[in-house]
Structures are given as structure tokens and as C-alpha cells.
Amino acid sequence: MIQVVELLPPNVEPHEYSLAPALVSEASQADILVISGHLSWELDLAQQVALSKGLPEKNVTIDLVHDFPDKIRWLTLPNETGVNLHGFWYLPENYLTIAGAVRDRLAALRPDLAQSLEQNYQDIVARMSDLDARISAIADDLKQYNREVLITYPEEQYLIAPFSLEVGESLVGSSEEITLSAARMQSIVTNLGAKRYSLIITSDLSQLMTIFESAREISSESGVPIVVLTAFPTPSFDSLLMYNGGALETGFMQTTNFTPSSSSSLDLPLLAIIALLLGIAALEYYFLTRKGH
């Protein structure tokens, strides 16, 4: 009924991408272009797609940053004044806002599908409600420990927020300046040694950047565990959150004084199995997709 096309493959770091003509051509075939709205090449893409269709941008693009500034829950990094625009879609409430926006735009284009679109949206709402209960159980476990962590990149603030963890510091700020001075590296290691931050949080997307090596070096020098979360919602947004919840609990188990509740500890083997199955599913999805092309 509805075909969704990801314009960038998962192994491409979007902040380092340069707009290519082939991408403009592919995007121009879509009825709706959904963009985050904070990357310059996305804005250029929206302009070129609208031009190719001979329509105003607002008719062909859903720009999440500029179209819904008051409906998105924004977070702010420590020592910064502006909102964090990186990865805001990882919050379940923002995920629902985006799903509702897509539903409304598609229903306007295809009124005959409005009822089915609404039913799909309500199914998502029900899934998010069930997911919220499971996330809350993990978050309750983590409250017994120091919840202030060091992250490597701004989007990870939104990856950990559902679990009530707090960002003490980010190696990369909103300016996306990746170079770390020796003095700042030493300051971070000192803070970790003083147990100001309990974990170092990074992601598989950050692994594509040079900052990941800095995170590994800091972890090695400080002895503080590094936890790699996933930023790729494959096969689903639900699995992303549950995988990350399991990864965080495992990370805290590597530190001292963490005792999972009975209900949570029963889930840990299951979470490990889920993580394994998700990896297999992701590989199958990749090879099937490659074969399909």
C-alpha cells in the first residue's frame, strides 16, 4: 500500500554526506519527502525536489524541525543554550508525533486510504504504550545507580533519555567539532576517574566517525565501560529501544553496586537472545535487500 524508501544506506554517516544528483532523482519520485530539517544537504534536496515537481516545498516535504517546532520534545546538552537537533526522533513521543504527521499528509494525498492509515497509527500508539511499560521497568532499575554518563555524540542524548539517564558531558557538541584537545581529554579522564560519570555511551553510528577512537582511548585510560547502543531501527523502532535497554543494563552490570531487580534480571538472558536474533535479522534483511536490487 505505502512504499517507504530510505535514501541513505545505514553505513553512511549523514552529517558527512554530500548531495548527489542520483539521490535527487530518486527522491523526486516520492509523493512525500520526510527530512529531519537540520542538515544542509536535506534542505537542498527538498528545494530541488520541489523544483522538479513544480510545487511549493511545503506540498512535497515534511520538515520535522521547521514544521513541528512546538510538537517535538527537545533536549539540550550541558553547557549549551540551543536545543539538540540530533536524533530527536529516537524519543517515543517524538516518534508518535512524526508518525501522526506522515499519517495526516498521506491521508490528504489519498483520502481512500485514510481509514487504514488511522488504524495503522492506532496500532503504533498501542505498541508504544506497551513499550513504555517495559522501558519504565528498565529505567526504574537504573535509578539505583549514578545515571550521569558521558556520551560521544549529541544524538545519543535522545537514545538514553527514555531510560532516564542524564548527559554529564558530550565529546562532540552541537557544533559537531570532533577534534578533542589533550587538555580536555585529560579533564574527561579525571572526571571519569572520580566516578562523576558511570558509563561512556556511544553508538554504531558514532563508530563511523573518528570520535569513536577517542571514546575507546578514554575508556581504556579511565577503566570506565563503554556501551555501544544502536541507532538503526532494524527491524523496528521497538527492537532498537529494547536492544539499547539490554545494552545499558549489561553496561551497568560491569560496574560496581548494580543489582538488577528480579523482573529485570529474568529479562537479561532474553535480551541477550533478542540482541542475537536482531543481528541475524539485520544480516538477512541486508542480503535480501541487496539480492532484490
Image (cartoon, helix red, strand yellow):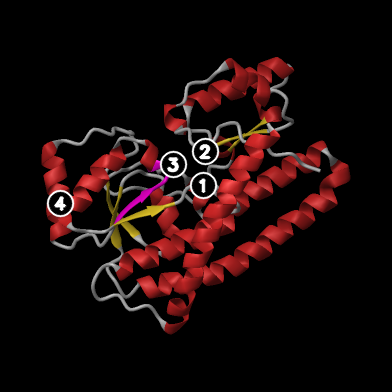
Q: Assign a secondary structure to mark 4.
A: helix
Instruction: Tell me: 117 left or right of 273.
Output: right
Quarter of the view holding residue 31: top right
Residue bearing mark 3: 86
Which residue was labeled with disc 2?
10
Please, what is the three-letter code of the amino acid marked with disc 2? Pro
Do the residues under discs 2 and 3 have CB atoms within 8 angstroms? no
In the displayed structure, does residue 23 sit left or right of residue 156?
A: right
Chain part drawn in magenta: 200-206
Label 3 – label 1 distance at C-alpha: 14 Å
Q: State how far apart marks 1 and 2 are (Cα).
A: 7 Å
Residue type highlighted by circle 1 = Phe
Q: Position of residue 257 (x, y in %)?
A: 25, 76
N-terminal label among 2 and 4: 2
Whole-Å distance between the Cαs marked 4 and 3?
28 Å
Q: Which label is found at residue 232?
A: 1
- Upstream in the sequence, badge 4 or badge 3? 3
